[in-house]
């Protein structure tokens, strides 16, 4: 066999030599390929629960053979490890055991358990980073301990937590003042880890036992999920207990309650408290209160007189599996005593009504250039009362995230619906819509007349003028709305059917001096695509 191979090899060399000689007049000798010596690449990263110092990091193949390490982590949780580049084509598991960390929630020094990250073969190259977090640990456990494919593990994790664990993201300890200058992505990654710390504390699991909680969650997620309750504390064979404790693995309800409990955030000499105005924190128009206190010198003095848009900015961002996007904002009103009322118009809920996870909302608040973040869980509003409809431009187009020219979306939000004159049993209602066209995924300004709209990356700006907004109730004639100059249009004394549960249909038309906006971006056809419909059921 060896001789045969040698002959074949020799023959191949000769063929190549012949070809080389034919195609290159200068070359008289065949190029000799030197035998390749495996070289090592350096991968750096961190073990984060928060920062786990003195942990032992090993890289293994999925069959358990060690390909690199062990190496220790530094006191800040960082490590650096050399891996033969020949090993990078294999699926790899980064494993960490032991070490110490300061638990974010309890602030106690604790000994870490095992954490891990699964890296698909061919993903890593020299200089890349692998950050091992609670999220990557659960994902890896689903693959290694429960036989899931990487894609299945990702889906199971996303269903439960509405994000994909990302080993490239370097988290910061959000309870450490040193994190204040970190970027939004690092804070988001740090918050995601801190949620597990608080979740453990909430269900009476110690920081040490939290690592068994990661394994328990993976076990829970290994069975067929119920979208409404992807974490139900059970697997196919019954209740999942955490390690050697008698504590049940947490449920989706526990998790959502924990995420919603992050309502106070500190930055240098400032404390900001976020208060949703309703317990059902829904998508569409959403008004909330921010309380801003100056905490310098250990006190708490209300911060008053912040100018909206200058001293005080609120910038929500949704992190989805495949993209990030901003959302339209309404106004900010100072209430006094350091309190400010803010209106956001959420394009999407964090989860659909059936429980399907969509993404994570990051509500960034900037006070005098210092930022804090909240991550509210935004519920889906009832379908019987439409919170948002869409109309589209026809000649009015944008270049989308894929570089394609598409009709510009105009988001129309139900802004207000109230009995005319404050009630008294009549059937007429005042109705306002808030309109926010899209410029890019990051920009949804309030519609003003006139204004110039950007049209995605590289698109031709669109000049808006002569805006007319009309509404018709239950097939009646159209009334023209009053432009309030802030993106809202008002209709007064609309006649609604007040029969309880009756689904009123309010059709809204949007026209500018160039065209009628349509539901499908095609040229308007009266009564076909020239209006969007809000369903309105009165209580
Ligand atoms: Cu979204």
Image: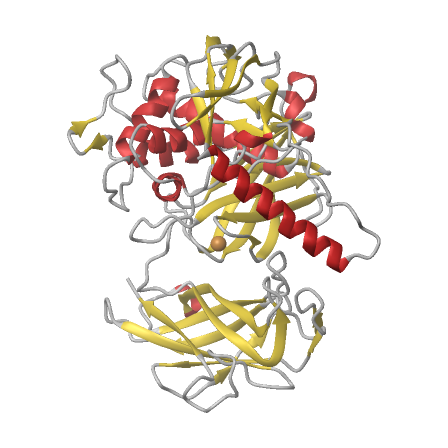
Residue 186 in view in this figure: yes
Residue 516 or 190: which is nearer the viewer? Answer: 190
Q: Residue at x 49, y 33 (%)?
A: 263
Residue 183, image x, y percentages: 66, 36
Q: Residue at x 38, y 65 (%)?
A: 386
Q: Residue at x 28, y 72 (%)?
A: 503
Q: How is the image coloured?
A: secondary structure
Q: Is residue 129 above or below residue 455?
A: above
View extreme (right): residue: 26
Quadrant of the rendered image containing residue 529: bottom left
Left or right for 119, reference 452: left
Q: Quadrant of the C terminus?
A: bottom left
Left or right for 339, reference 276: right
Q: Residue at x 16, y 29 (%)?
A: 238
Residue 195 in view in this figure: no
Quadrant of the rendered image containing residue 41: top right
């Amino acid at each position: 066999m060896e001789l045969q191979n040698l002959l074949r090899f020799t023959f191949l060399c000769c063929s190549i030599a012949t070809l080389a000689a034919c195609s290159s007049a200068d070359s008289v000798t065949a190029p000799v390929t030197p035998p390749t010596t495996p070289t090592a690449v350096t991968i750096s990263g961190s073990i984060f629960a928060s920062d786990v110092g003195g942990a032992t990091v090993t890289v293994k193949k999925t069959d358990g053979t060690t390909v690199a390490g062990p190496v220790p982590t530094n006191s800040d949780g960082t490590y650096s490890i050399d891996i033969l580049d020949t090993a990078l084509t294999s699926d790899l598991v980064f494993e960490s055991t032991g070490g110490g960390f300061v638990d974010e929630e309890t602030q106690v020094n604790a000994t870490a358990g095992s954490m891990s990250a699964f890296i698909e073969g061919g993903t890593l190259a020299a200089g890349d980073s692998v950050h091992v977090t609670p999220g990557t640990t659960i994902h890896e456990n689903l693959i290694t301990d429960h036989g899931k494919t990487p894609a299945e593990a990702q889906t199971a994790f996303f269903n439960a937590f509405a994000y994909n664990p990302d080993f490239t993201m370097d988290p910061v300890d959000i309870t450490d003042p040193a994190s204040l200058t970190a970027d939004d992505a690092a804070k988001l990654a740090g918050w995601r880890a801190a949620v597990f710390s608080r979740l453990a504390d909430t269900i009476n699991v110690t920081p040490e036992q939290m690592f068994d909680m990661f394994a328990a969650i993976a076990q829970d997620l290994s069975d067929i999920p119920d979208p409404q309750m992807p974490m139900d504390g059970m697997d196919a064979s019954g209740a999942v207990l955490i390690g050697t404790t008698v504590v049940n693995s947490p449920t989706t309800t526990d998790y959502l309650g924990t995420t919603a409990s992050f309502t106070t955030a500190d930055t240098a000499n400032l404390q900001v408290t976020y208060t949703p105005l309703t317990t059902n924190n829904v998508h569409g128009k959403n008004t909330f209160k921010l309380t801003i206190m100056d905490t310098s010198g250990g006190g708490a003095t209300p911060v008053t007189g912040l100018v909206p848009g200058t001293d005080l900015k609120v910038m929500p961002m949704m992190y989805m599996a495949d993209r990030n996007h901003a959302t339209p904002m309404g106004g900010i009103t100072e209430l006094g005593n350091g309190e400010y009322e803010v209106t956001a118009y959420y394009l999407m809920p964090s989860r659909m009504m059936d429980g399907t996870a969509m993404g994570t909302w990051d509500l960034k608040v900037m006070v005098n250039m210092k930022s804090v973040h909240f991550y509210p869980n935004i519920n889906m509003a009832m379908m019987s009362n439409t919170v948002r409809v869409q109309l589209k431009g026809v000649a009015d187009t944008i270049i989308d995230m894929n570089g394609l020219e598409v009709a510009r979306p105009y988001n129309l939000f139900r802004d207000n619906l109230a009995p005319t004159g404050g009630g008294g049993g009549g059937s007429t209602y005042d109705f306002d819509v808030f309109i926010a066209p899209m410029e890019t995924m990051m920009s949804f300004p309030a519609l003003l007349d006139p204004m110039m709209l950007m049209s995605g990356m590289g698109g031709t700006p669109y000049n808006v003028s002569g805006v007319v907004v009309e509404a018709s109730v239950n097939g009646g004639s159209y009334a023209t709305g009053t432009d309030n100059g802030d993106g809202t249009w008002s209709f007064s004394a609309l006649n609604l059917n007040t029969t309880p549960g009756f689904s009123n249909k309010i059709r809204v038309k949007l026209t500018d001096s160039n065209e009628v906006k349509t539901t499908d971006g095609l040229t308007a056809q009266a009564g076909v695509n020239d209006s969007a419909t809000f369903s309105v059921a009165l209580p």
